[in-house]
Image (cartoon, grey):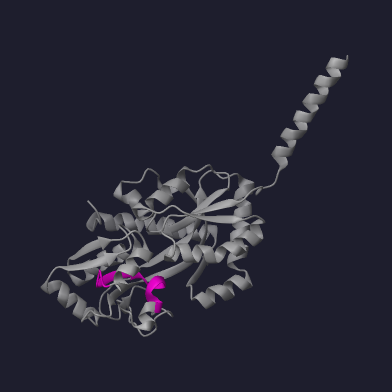
Amino acid sequence: MHARKVLFGLMSAVGVLVAGGAVAEYPERPVTLIVGYPAGGGTDIQSRALVPYLEKYLGTSVVVENREGAGGLIGATYIANSKPDGYTIGALNFPSMYSPIVQGNASYKEDAFTPLANQIGGDLALTVNKASPIKTVQEFVDAAKANPVVVGVTGVGHPSQITALLFEEAAGIKLNFVPFNGGGPARLAMLGNHVTLGFMNLNEVFADHRSGELRVLATSGATRSPLSPDVPTFKEAGYNVQFNLLAGFGAPKGLPADVEAKLLDAFQKALNDPDYTAEAKKRELIMLPLTQGEFAEALKQGNANLAELWKSKPWTK
């Protein structure tokens, strides 16, 4: 009888432990946010700007981990292959993380991610070093028609290269690309005059344009950006080019419903926190806080457009 009581007591204790594990609320430990680009680039900066507010509403620490390389492919692959438990999330950029799928060199598919929320949008910018004699879009086109032109881009299949390809088609020119591993390295190369011409994320070079270190000749939005109101759009310059990037967050597919709900709630509250919006305005981030449904739909449409572009203007071989 005594042995049976002891056994029953042990089984009851195990039952309490199991039950305790089952009802434990997410999150119990810090969450890792993967950024697949170098520190100091646009994605890194904007992600870190949101982290304190995400921590506030998640109720745990959020640790940014830069897993750079292959133009964001390493980070994207890591996110896609992570355990879908809510403890690994990541920056989810379009088109950078989706173009490898179209190219055929990604091990993940479009549905490998659970989109959570979009943070910002942004224009792309035709940019030149201050030492360049080129001062207008037309002068850039004339130079490209006269001699082969080398332009820097922030990565293969990144929004800067996609914009450059659209511009190639609209202007009837051919460009030679030098891809960098993210916006940070590309910007430094532009500032150092190692590459005198480039297509860049406006978010990363507008301050250099204002200081005169770099010159932005045109931007890719439907209207002029508030970051550079003195700069015409490509359409204003006479070229039918329009393209915008998306920069948000996602997780591996297969999140438990309660974990996904907690993340969605935390992201929406963080993105709409008055202190965050004030800081984002101060940092001059172009806010585009899309909900999960809106973000997913934008990605779906964007990927369809990307696949169509690949048919006529493949960006790698």
Q: Quarter of the image holding residue 217?
A: bottom left
Determine the residue positioned at 43% across, 52% down: 67
Q: Is residue 164 left or right of residue 40?
A: left
Above or below: residue 216 compared with residue 312: below
Q: Is residue 202 magenta?
A: yes
Q: Is residue 57 left or right of residue 143?
A: right
Q: Residue furthest front?
A: 192
Determine the residue positioned at 74% across, 38% down: 20
Number of disc labels: 0
Q: Which residues are magenta?
A: 193-207
Above or below: residue 298 compared with residue 139: above
Image location (x, y in percent) of residue 119: 51, 65
Residue 176 seen in render: yes
Q: Is residue 293 magenta?
A: no
Q: Quadrant of the N terminus?
A: top right
Taking depth in this image into account, of 23 and 64 the one nearest to the observer is: 64
Q: Residue furthest right?
A: 1
Taking depth in this image into account, of 120 and 276 the one nearest to the observer is: 276
Q: Residue furthest top?
A: 1
Q: Quarter of the image holding residue 225?
A: bottom left
Image location (x, y in percent) of residue 122: 42, 70
Above or below: residue 305 compared with residue 103: below
Above or below: residue 209 compared with residue 260: below
Image location (x, y in percent) of residue 3: 84, 15
Taking depth in this image into account, of 80 and 187 the one nearest to the observer is: 187
Residue 112 seen in render: no
Image location (x, y in percent) of residue 188: 34, 69
Determine the residue positioned at 79% across, 25% down: 10
Q: Residue furthest bottom?
A: 230
